[in-house]
Image (cartoon, grey):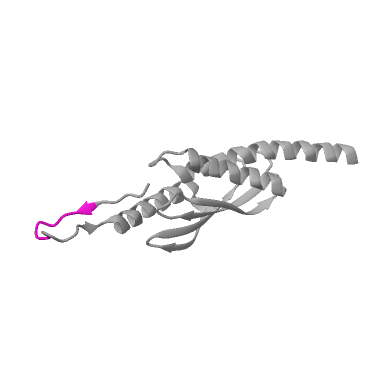
Amino acid sequence: MAVELFFFFPFSKGFPPFRLQPLMAALLLDEELEVLQSIYLDELSVIQKSPSEAALEIRCSPSREEECFVTITVSIILTAAPPAFRVSDSFGLDAREVKQIEKCMKDVVLTSDPGEAICFSAIESAKERLEALNSAASCQVAFWVRACA
């Protein structure tokens, strides 16, 4: 759902209203970007930014303070439309697991209501999935070490 605001000038009788949609989209984009930067600090990189679009990358790893066996880099395209997510790099995951993480993020976008923090929710959903995969990977590493000993 696109946000469209109109401003009527009293002297614009008979003329179409001045559209503020591009301005509002740029303000919302800047606000979303500022919030994400304040939450993810060093993990977030702004790759490209224009008034109507931003390309971001965020390095995600499990939230828990334990050994990390899996990580991903998520590429995000922010526009006036719902954001697009793609896992652009991964460590310790196979293609099936990467697709599962991408599906988790797309499901967040599809089930979110307008005005919700979609990017934050999708990233946190990916981190939760990484925690589960990290636990499974640590079990596999422990099993492998025991088998080789």
**Residue 65 visible, this orientation:** no
User: Which image quarter: residue 17?
Assistant: bottom left
Residue positioned 12% across, 60% down in the render: 12
Is residue 10 rendered magenta in the image? yes
Give residue 146's position: percent from left, percent from top.
86, 37
Residue 91, compared with residue 107, is above or below; it is below
Q: Which secondary structure class fits the magenta region best? A: loop
Give residue 103's position: percent from left, percent from top.
59, 43
User: Which image quarter: residue 54?
Assistant: bottom left
Residue 89, compared with residue 1, is above or below; it is below
User: Which image quarter: residue 129?
Assistant: top right
Position of residue 25 in the picture relative to residue 85 (left or right): left
Residue 51, compared with residue 118, is above or below; it is below
Position of residue 62 in the picture relative to residue 95 (left or right): left
Q: Which residues are magenta?
A: 6-12
Residue positioned 62% across, 41% down in the render: 62
Is residue 7 rendered magenta in the image? yes
Image quadrant containing the C terminus: top right
Give residue 125's position: percent from left, percent from top.
55, 39
Give residue 118's position: percent from left, percent from top.
46, 43
Position of residue 47 in the picture relative to residue 90 (left or right): left
- Toward the viewer: 59 or 88? 88
- Toward the viewer: 27 or 62? 27
Residue positioned 49% across, 43% down in the render: 109
